[in-house]
Image (cartoon, rainbow, N blue to C red):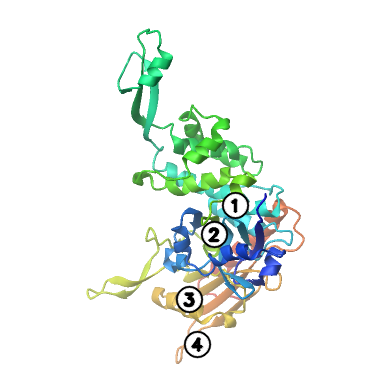
Amino acid sequence: MSNPYLYGQTEDNKQSKSLDEIFKIQFPKELLNELYDISGKKISDLKNQDGFLIYCNEDKLKDDVENNSIFTISGDKLTTYNIAGFVGTQNTLLSIRSRFAQDNGDDYFLHYMLQKVFNINISTLEHATDRNKAFQFLPYLFKYYFLKALSQGLYKKYVWNKYNDSKVKGTIDIARHIKHNFIFTGNIAYNVREHSYDNNINQLIRHTIEYISNLKMFSMMLESDDMADLVQDIRSITPTYSEKNRQQVINNNLKSDIHPYYYEYEPLRQICLQILMEDDELKYGRAENKIYGVLFDAAWLWEEYLNTLVSEIDSSFIHTRNKEGVGMICMLKNKDNKPKYWQAYPDFYSSALDIVMDAKYKHAKEVKDIARDDRMQIISYMHVLGLKKGVFLHPADNKHAGNISYGKLNIPEKNTDEYVYQYCFKIPQGEINCMQDFIDKITVSENEFIEYWKSVLKNNNETVKC
């Protein structure tokens, strides 16, 4: 490329690094200005700008996370938060990995959480340049938004179709008629505006499907039980598909004209465009003042990943989802003595097992060192729900892996059996040879987690022995 380009990578979870360490080159000042345009801005504001920025944090509105920033720059330091993924502008790209990523840049942990949460199985990461590793996250979201969009039905819109026969039912196209029917044989050239499934949106989806089908890492995703029939539907309704038309299809979809009824198709359109823009000239030659990228709320991913494990401990656990109001508790009653105010959403709780669990995507500490707000939150949940056990679930590095600590609540003049616990879930690190190697090792951590809490909860009256 003729223009200078700035690429850097860092880690999430309040990592603070110098810009020189992140980008490893002497970067032009004008490129740094593009990063300053993102620094400190709310994610919600960045999403509203012209571009293709997807922020995936389903059911996490309770934390109002879109009011947070992707990163902030102060002096020569860039500080990240709980946001992973990548974000770029015209000449810059910043990849934010999980803090458990390998030294070579392979982020097995983030990919594994995405697999579990989005129900996609892969056993290998394709070899890619550092810059292209950021874009490996896109196919996960394709499945997620594809299924959401198709749940609204196949996208149908008005298109202009051209005909040349004797069944005139639209507007006669005089120029085309003269060209094709110079010797009159009874046919008339005409144009008709009619509903069609073979439109620019479904063509875009079709091109994305065919592109993914050639990716060794994700091709099997299209054949999964929940995808196969829908993929076949898209193929059958796009008979005019041609691979050589890909650039034209991309151009036709750069501006959204999706009908409001099909609102679930808008994020799918953006994901498809980013997947298809794999060519360097397309991917990095972005228009000025546009922001693109895919961001994940790592705290949400951690919670949803744990949900796949907690559900195996006992079926009585409730995993709260604020969009549907599932598991919501009200901490205040109204004048009619009915729960109504101060809505709260504990991550996981079971009245039958006398326990509430809170997923915390933070650096592991001993239970005595847990932050004040987190302490007050778990105690509030225990008190309002009338539960005796409160648990913090942290992902842990090698230093803290396997730590289990607890403390008994100190309530004056009351001999209580209420305890607060911290469980440090071991994330494999060090010598990880491949994705399958990571899967094998984290499966051991998962089995230990499930068996530990099953043994603790088998008798509600027993005190945990650490």
The amino acid type of the residue labelled 3 equals Ile
**x, y percentage for residue 299?**
54, 65
Relative to 34, is 207 above or below? above
Tell me the residue that label 1 is attached to: 137
Identify the disc placed on residue 410.
Answer: 4
Q: Is residue 156 left or right of residue 282?
A: left
Q: Of 169 and 311, which appears nearest the observer?
A: 169
- Let me know if residue 454 appears in the view: no
Label 1 – label 2 distance at C-alpha: 10 Å
Kindly report the distance in space between the C-alpha atoms of the residues bearing marks 3 and 4. Answer: 14 Å
Using the image, tell me which numbered label, if any, was put on residue 213.
none
- Residue 334 position in % (x across, y down): 26, 74
Q: Going from the N terminus, do you reach mark 1 or mark 3 first? A: 1
Cα separation between marks 1 and 4: 46 Å
- Label 3: state its secondary structure: helix
In this orientation, which residue lies closer to the viewer: 79 or 179? Answer: 179
Query: Of marks 3 and 4, which one's residue comes earlier in the chain?
Result: 3
